[in-house]
Amino acid sequence: MKIAWFCIPAHGHTNPTLGIVKEMTKAGHEVFYFSFEQFREKIEATGAVFISCDGYDIDIEDKDAADRVGKDMAFATKMLVRSTLALDDMVAEKVNEIKPDLIVSDSVAHWGKLIAMKHGIPYVSSTTTFAFNQYSSRYMNQGIGQLFKMLFSMPAINRELNKLREKGYPVKNILEIVSNDNNTNTIVYTSKEFQPCSETFSDKYCFIGPSIRPVESEMKKTAEKTIYISMGTVVKNREIYDNCIKALGNTDYQVIISLGDNRITEENIPGNIEIYDYVDQMAVLSVADVFLTHCGMNSTSEALYYEVPLVMFPQTPEQGAVAKRVEETGAGVMLTSTKEKDLLSAFETVFSDTSYRKNAQKISQGFKKCGGAKEAREYLEKVYSSEHSGK
């Protein structure tokens, strides 16, 4: 089987796919992975053929643009159309050359789905967030205001879609592109138990559990209770780190802070607080007792896999959906503010109430029952067999 795989230039969307791609190539299938140079090395390490999408007129790495995409459907459509048309000639040439049996694309790499539609190739969505339908999308807080904004922008959206139609893409409407229905073959990187409204999804949805990397370097536990703090790359409330240092300094807790690209203003760091630019997150989670997180899907899944309850401060609607589900399952608490007293109160709540740890353990058990990359391979082989036998 030959697969053309499309992804956006984001670690959180690329990393979960690598285990599946490796599993596919080990089984003798050919995977042609359309991505961006910064991911070449790790993609080629799976045995896939890397095809570069760099050098085209695509702005999806711009953080401000990425934030706007989530709020402005007309702008999102413009970006989607621009990306698809920028890649159109190159991808058409490669698809004609490769003749893939299946196209797999990240649920946000909409050009992959459009290419499947244009070339009449069976399509599978790779969904590294929750799967969203009319029921689970309520977790995203998309209210009536969003609906009116979308309706107001429909003329602009249709003007953009006409550009696709002129290039041979059989597009009826924007929802057909940006959302999957129950007939869309979909791989979801979580468990059925953790997926919101999982009973509303058809058996075309394959819940394979999160992709968990092995621990690569040891992290020493130096106190009875260890707090891990990491807020990802886009932090709108930067004083959260300084306030954590003030609230947790000189306590009995071991506090491990991973800053990423963020910086702190505190100069006097108490001895119980360890600050790093980057850590082996798996190593830290293997010793942590609670995790303060922005609730990115991967970080949340990794913490729950290690049975670590959460203190949550989401920064985007997607992270808000994850946080809402964690809160609903009783495996974490939502921060109401980042003041010192509120931070300390949230940590003490999780430590004093053992139900948070127990509920994290339940979710972990569900993750560990999932079939992972092997189940995904069997699923893709089944989709291929079904599509090519005319069923």
Image (cartoon, grey):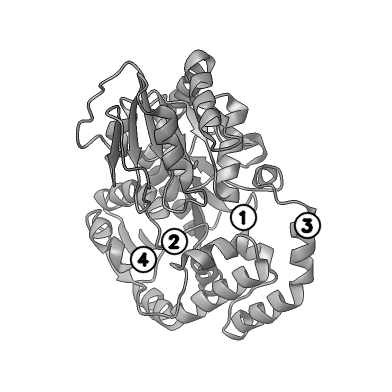
Q: Quadrant of the N terminus?
A: bottom left
Residue placed most toward the observer, 169 or 384: 169
| Sequence-first tag of 2 and 4 | 4
Residue 342 pos. (x, y %): 56, 30
Residue 259 pos. (x, y %): 35, 46
Residue placed most toward the observer, 377 or 66: 66
Q: Residue at x 75, y 77 (%)?
A: 155
Disc 4 crowd rating (10 Å Cα; few below 14, some 14-19, many 20+) is many
| Sequence-first tag of 4 and 3 | 4
Amino acid carrying mark 4 in the image: Ser
| Sequence-first tag of 2 and 3 | 2
**Figure check: 286 above or below 11:** above
Label 1 residue SS? loop
| Sequence-first tag of 1 and 4 | 4
Label 3 residue SS? helix
How far apart are the two marked residues, 3 and 1, measured between alpha carbons?
A: 22 Å
Residue placed farthest to the front in the image? 268
Residue placed farthest to the bottom in the image? 166
The residue that disc 2 covers is: 102
Q: Residue at x 55, y 71 (%)?
A: 80
Amino acid carrying mark 2 in the image: Leu
Q: Nearer the viewer, mark 2 or mark 3?
A: 3
How far apart are the two marked residues, 1 and 4, measured between alpha carbons?
A: 22 Å
| Sequence-first tag of 2 and 1 | 2
How far apart are the two marked residues, 2 and 4, measured between alpha carbons?
A: 17 Å
Amino acid carrying mark 1 in the image: Asn
How far apart are the two marked residues, 2 and 1, measured between alpha carbons?
A: 17 Å
Amino acid carrying mark 3 in the image: Gly
The residue that disc 1 covers is: 180
Residue 145's tag is 3
**Figure check: 313 above or below 349:** below
The residue that disc 4 covers is: 35
